[in-house]
Amino acid sequence: MTNNLKIPRDYVNTFSIVGRDPETGELGVAVASKFLSVGSLVPWAKAGVGAIATQSWVNPLYGIRGLELMEAGKSAEETSRILTEEDENKEVRQAGFVDASGNSATFTGTECYTWAGGISGFNFAVQGNILTGEDVVQAMADAFQNAQGDLASRLTASLQAGEDAGGDSRGKQSAALLVVKENGGYGGVTDRYIDLRIDDHEEPVKELTRILKLHLLYFQKPKEEDILSVDGELKAELTALLQKLGYIKTEDPSDEEVYEAIHSFHLIENFDERVMEKGSIDKKVVEFIQELAAQKD
């Protein structure tokens, strides 16, 4: 029964975590697998409603109908029960659920390929199939509960812990991260706050972690404590760095030229979400300018 050669190609052998941040209300899914573009099938989430991972012999209706059920007031446990009771092929399914109140559930059918199983707790559920062992999901659960920071970082930390513990017994190929929050998408138009996919890579979880750091750098709103005044030594440093990078063409620029160069840098380097009022700059942008200029040494 554990002979990997008999596993169908469309069987999504994977490990995943669904989670909720009680402080921000964010909901999300992180997943990794020896399967092409796992992010196109497994993760489902809706702000203020819940998050679902559907895997093994994937049934997308677990994501679609599951979110409908939770939006109608069903808990994670009730949603899992209803979906599996309605599914005549439930024994080949695996799924994880967390609702907007932090209730969670995980389901593993009896015909999922070993090792297969899951762990659920308040605000999270982890599950996996064709794993190297139970220690994979235990490591994921421990990492999520002990990690610090925002939900996305905690979910990817959990994913990395699962991989470090053995992960998918067949190897690595893809990984994905989906986090939703109300008006969290670009421009505040949608709830799709973070949607990152590594479809085919030798080290998909590590690459997902790298891309997440870039996403947070580019798209997170500035923290109040990171807002700096462009004056004194900082102004002199930024002037020299922006001259080095070609954003300032004159040798002794006016204040207006410096401010305009800073604004242009934001737009060209895609720091739209970190644009400040004239005379101010985000510390994260300063650090990026310093790193970029250092590469020209």
Image (cartoon, rainbow, N blue to C red):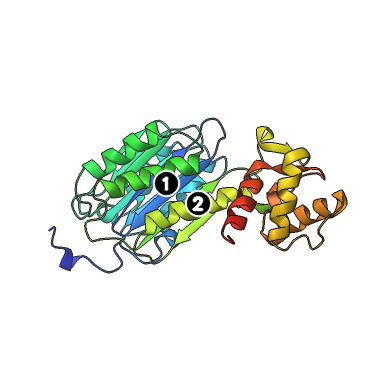
Q: Which mark is residue 231?
A: none
Within 10 Å of the Cα at label 1, are there few (<14), some (14-19), or many (20+) other Cα atoms? many
Is 140 placed left or right of 223 in the picture? left
Closer-to-camera residue (96/275): 275
| 129 lies above or below 99 | below
Q: Please state the horizontal and vertical placement of residue 14, each as a whole percent of the image.
A: 31, 55
Viewport quadrant of the C terminus: bottom right
Residue that badge 2 annotates? 212
User: Which image quadrant is residue 269 in?
Assistant: bottom right
N-term mark: 1 or 2? 1
How far apart, in angstroms, are the residues tagged by discs 1 and 2? 9 Å
Residue that badge 1 annotates? 156
Q: Are marks 1 and 2 in contact (CB under 8 Å)?
A: yes
Q: Please state the horizontal and vertical placement of residue 230, each as a whole percent of the image.
A: 77, 42
Is 33 placed left or right of 190 in the picture? left
| 145 lies above or below 234 | above
- The amino acid on which the numbered mark 1 sits, given as a three-letter code, is Thr
